[in-house]
Image (spheres, rainbow, N blue to C red):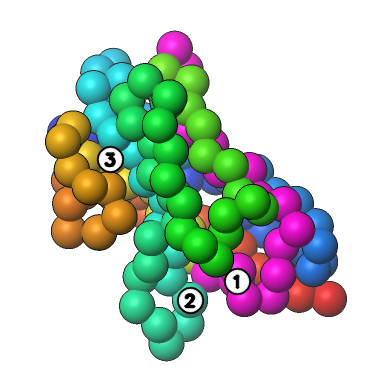
Amino acid sequence: QVQLVESGGGLVQPGGSLRLSCAASERTFSNYELGWFRQAPGKEREFVAFITRSGRTTNYADSVKGRFTISRDNAKNTMYLQMNSLKPEDTAIYYCAAAIPGRNGIYDYEYDYWGQGTQVTVSS
């Protein structure tokens, strides 16, 4: 059982930056592929970013490509999401998730473990 805890959310002005963290309890953290998803009010949860176990391969939703960067530090059992040039439409609860390797990584049903989420609000 992998427990995931997100942090780093908050209120930021348009154009600003935030860095989300996802800390895992599991020492075999490096065995899992990881992803970020988000859910805005009244909308379905959507894929944001994905990273493989080694961190060498990443994938992003078109809406965040060039603005967000996913990374991981397996020694610290932590994943990150650096969010730059934030827009009001980025406002959502952001969730991190872990998946057994071999999945596509862009669908929420592929993930086995989820964090509780952290709120990101982009507003002036």
User: What's the residue at 48%, 76% (across, down)?
Assistant: 40
> x, y percentage for residue 98?
27, 40
For label 2, the residue is: 40
User: What's the residue at 79%, 68% (across, down)?
Assistant: 14
Callout 1: few (<14), some (14-19), or many (20+) C-alpha neighbours within 10 Å?
Answer: many
Image mark for residue 91: 1
**What distance separates the C-alpha of mark 3 from that of mark 2?**
21 Å
Question: Does label 2 or label 1 sit earlier along the sequence?
Answer: 2
Image mark for residue 98: 3
Identify which amino acid the numbered label 3 is placed on.
Ala
Residue 94 or residue 85, whichever sits in front: 85
Q: Tell me if residue 89 comes above or below residue 58 in the rendering.
A: below
> x, y percentage for residue 110?
17, 51
Q: Tell me if residue 117 comes above or below residue 100 in the rendering.
A: below
- The magenta span reads 75-92
Local SS, label 3: strand
Local SS, label 1: loop
Q: Is residue 93 visible?
A: yes
Identify which amino acid the numbered label 1 is placed on.
Thr
Callout 2: few (<14), some (14-19), or many (20+) C-alpha neighbours within 10 Å?
Answer: some
81 in magenta: yes
Residue 47 or residue 76, whichever sits in front: 47
> x, y percentage for residue 81?
56, 43
Q: Are marks 3 and 1 in contact (CB under 8 Å)?
A: no
